[in-house]
Amino acid sequence: MRFDTKIRYDFVKNRKKFFTFSIVLTIIGILSLLIFQLNLGIDFKSGTTMDTVTEQPVKQQEVISVLDELGYSEVPTVGGTNNDRISVRFGDELTNEQTREIQTAFKASFGEGASFEVNVVSAELARELAVKTIWAILAASILIMLYVMVRFEWRFAVSANIAILYDCFVVVALFSIFRLEVDLPFIAAVLTTLGYSINDKIVIFDRIRENLRFNPTRNEKQLTELVNASIWQTMARNLYTVLTVFIVTLFIFLFGSESIRLFSLAMLIGLISGAYSTLCIASPLWFEFKKREKKKKTTGGNARPTDQPIV
Amino acid sequence: MVMKRLLAFSVVVVVLFGAIIWTSPSILKEVKLGLDLKGGFEVLYEASPYDEGGVVTPESLKQTAKALEKRIDESGVAEPEILPEGSNRIRVRLPGVENEEEIREMLAKPINLTFRAPDGTIMLDGRDFKENSAGVAYDNFNRPIVTIELKDGNKLYDVTSALVGQKLAIYLDEEMISDPVVNYPISGTSAQISLGDAKVAEAEYLRDLINMGSLPLKLTEKYTQSVGAKLGLDSMKDTVTAGVIGSVIVLVFMMLVFRIPGFVASISIITYAWLLILVHNWLNATLTLPGIAAFVLGVGMSVDANIITAERIKEEIRSGKSMISSLKAGSKNSFRTIMDANITSIIASIALYVIGDGAIKGFALTMIFSIIVSVITNIYLSRFLLSMLVQSNAFMKPKFYGVKEEDVRAL
């Protein structure tokens, strides 16, 4: 044994299980996106949302009757710590006058001190925003791939990229499966996932690269050992980092404002998925690519010197 | 020697925290909050030509944005943001606006440039001018004049012959900009406006105004968001409190697990947060909800940088090296990892900044700053502080670094 590392769990040997799990999750995600699509919030769908904070507790039925009088059939949700938050989503783009009318009625019924947040979006713009986000993520991932290719090698670049795109997708897929609302901050959460995820991958690949430099591997067994050792050498760092960020995000999720709750949930999902994909997807994927290269070399007979990692 | 290094360390930390505590209240007060946090009004306009067959040029969009800015300034709204976006959009952000309806109505009006007779009759309006044709020239005395060109020469002749010897005042909306006198009837489509001893800047202003008026754009609201001041502030307070509690727990955790490096990390992370807000203020950036997300990500990456270094130092200590060489090797080996991770994140952020707009841009920008500040504090400051402590020889036992004595191997 060349690595002074206790391998408590063989990630490489069990890679097929992880791959299967992730592929199944991806397929479920794709199906869910195709069938149920995303529960698009106002930022992505034409219409109007009106959030109201009142000074006194309100009952849902009261809000319904106020809306009903004005001729709206939308069903409001009432929440907040003491039932002082009303949220109504209108399918139409309300005009200025309509909004004012509703606000006046709310003030008359629930107190003059009511505070409002109104969002109006046209459909075309929302679609454009979604498309732009996807482009932004793809462009970012391609640039990341190029950088990793230059600093490391293409196998690392491809494995890392598959893993980070998978993480971003998992966040989107879980939001589709659980019918959670997708709004503008959600995009920020997906982008944050991208940031964390790539950070994790670089750390572990850097370790693999370093181990590779001092321990040339001759066969699959040695390569397996190298990847596992690298994973376990960086395990403490991975756990600590994920744990610390998890704590901060969890606090924001639990005690932060209503408007940021789904956002922090998306970040939590991304965080967990990122940690998982680093250990169970990115590193084993790299192993798969590298293993193939070894095989080619031994069968080809015309062996090149071992790939030296670029430093 | 021990005391000297420790003293130096204490002085650095005391000075640093003194500065942080002393400046924090004013820095926090200066943070420019986005309207999703402080309340206000945002609207995205799509501009379309007023006349059929017209086109929206980058020039006309810029001019229209300028005109909106002027209108908003006159209404007394503080710190408006008016940004032309893409080929035909203008985004307007008005934090802290109360009389939203009025301002919305005022903004949606097209630019209205009129030329009026002394009795107030409108003789010409912006659309009578050839698009974007006004320019600045100089008369024989080298004084600036504004040259104009009209679509219809007959109309110009009619107007000027009716008003010889009288003033033909130029109005933007209801504000008089200039009131030149008509000296003689002008035939043809070109004319010039003499401004007497006016400065070049005034002539240029009038030129821009006429060009702006010749290309009136119709603005349609595509997206509006208005946040009540109380709602925004509530969100902000809860979120910041939650974030601070979470961060304090993380710092305590770092100190428990990593001891000396954890203690140093806590100092760096607090400095990082302070410096980031400071930089944010210097750049006059606005803090929004997605910005807070980037901030949290930044804190995470800072913690990570410290953890990577601390873990690496632990490994080196375990391998049996001395404290000082463990620190050196640990710092050196972790530097590359951290830099690679940070550079990749910067690259991703730049891509997001270039491609995204609105919220994505804000997120990416905060992200870029936070990485730069993080590298400065969590690599260089951490290392500097840690090396002072290690070299003081006061903390020579592995347990000060979270390593168990029995785990240390003989070299």
Image (cartoon, helix red, strand yellow):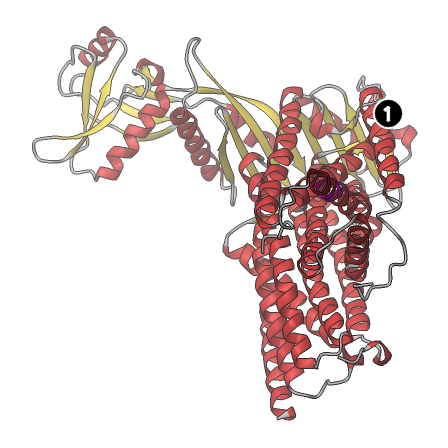
- Outermost residue on the front side: it is A301
* Element class at badge 1: loop
- Outermost residue on the top side: it is B154
Kind of residue indicated by mark 1: Val
Foreground of the two, A88 or B343: B343
Foreground of the two, B290 or A171: A171
Question: Toward which corner of the image does residue B143 lie, by quadrant?
Answer: top left
Residue ID for mark 1 = A75
Seen in the picture, residue B52 relative to B299 is either above or below; the reply is above
* Image coords of residue B349 (percent x, y): 59, 44
Q: Is residue A289 magenta?
A: yes
Residue at image location 62% in from the left, 81% down from the top: B388
Q: Is residue B170 magenta?
A: no
Which image quarter holds the C terminus of chain B? bottom right
User: Does residue A122 appear in the picture of this structure?
Assistant: yes
Residue at image location 41% in from the left, 26% down from the top: B58
Majority SS type along the magenta span: helix
Q: What span is in magenta?
A: A288-294
